[in-house]
Image: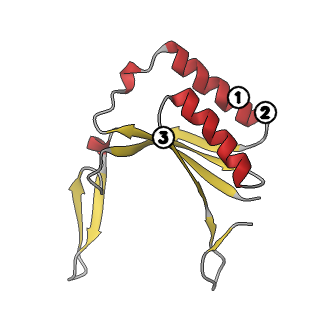
C-alpha cells in the first residue's frame, strides 16, 4: 500500500508550550481515528530546530557537523505522520484533518519505493 508523509509546519521560533488542551485533545482524537482506520504507521513531534545538527560533505570528502537546521527558512517541520493510504485523495483527507487539529500548515507527500538495483519510483 502506498505510504504518505503528512508533515506539520511550524513558524521559526514556534513555542510548543502554547498548545492548549483543546489542541492536544484534537491531535489525540485524530491519532485515534487514524489508528482505527489502520492508516497510522508512525507519528512523532520533533525537537526545536535549535537542537538540530546539520551534516555536509565538503569538496575534500570530509563531513562537517554544525549546530542548527540544514535550511534557513521561515517554517520548519515540527512533526509528522507516516500513513498507509490507498491513494493521494485519502492522504489529503488526513492532511486536511491534521491541519485543523494542529492549527498549522501541512504538507502531504508520497514516499518513493526504492527497489534493489532500480531507480526510486512512486509507490502505486
Whole-angstrom CA distance, mark 3 to mark 2, is 21 Å
Q: Is residue 45 left or right of residue 59?
A: right
Q: Position of residue 105 (x, y in %)?
A: 48, 39
**In this image, 106 relative to 72: left or right?**
right
**Residue at horizontal 52%, vertical 30%?**
102
**Which residue has dot 3 on it?**
79
Work out whether residue 46 can be spotted: no
Q: Nearer the viewer, residue 19 or 51?
A: 19
The residue sitting at 29% across, 51% down in the picture is 69
Q: Are marks 2 and 1 in contact (CB under 8 Å)?
A: yes
* Residue beneath the point at 29% across and 63% down: 55
Q: x, y percentage for residue 99?
A: 55, 34
Whole-percent x, y for residue 90 in the image? 73, 47
Mark 3 closeness class: few <14, some 14–19, many ≥20 residues within 10 Å? some
Look at the image and tell me in which quarter the N terminus lies.
Answer: bottom right
- Residue 110: mark in rendering: none
Would you say the residues marked 3 and 2 are in contact, meaning their CB atoms lie under 8 Å apart?
no
> SS at mark 2?
helix
- State which tag comes first along the sequence, 3 or 2: 2
Element type where label 3 sits in the image: strand
Q: Which residue is mark 2?
A: 36
Q: Which residue is mark 1?
A: 32
Up the image or down, 2 lies above or below 75; here it is below
Amino acid at each position: 500500500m502506498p505510504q504518505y508523509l503528512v508533515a506539520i509546519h511550524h513558524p521559526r521560533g514556534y513555542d510548543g508550550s502554547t498548545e492548549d488542551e483543546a489542541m492536544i485533545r484534537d491531535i489525540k482524537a485524530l491519532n485515534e481515528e487514524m489508528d482505527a482506520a489502520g492508516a497510522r504507521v508512525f507519528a512523532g513531534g520533533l525537537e526545536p530546530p535549535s537542537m538540530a545538527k546539520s551534516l555536509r560533505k565538503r569538496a575534500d570528502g570530509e563531513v562537517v557537523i554544525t549546530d542548527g537546521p540544514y535550511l534557513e527558512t521561515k517554517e520548519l517541520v515540527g512533526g509528522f505522520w507516516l500513513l498507509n493510504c490507498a491513494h493521494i485523495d485519502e492522504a489529503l483527507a488526513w492532511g486536511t484533518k491534521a491541519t485543523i487539529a494542529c492549527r498549522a500548515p501541512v504538507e502531504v507527500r508520497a514516499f518513493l519505493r526504492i527497489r534493489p538495483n532500480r531507480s526510486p519510483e512512486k509507490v502505486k
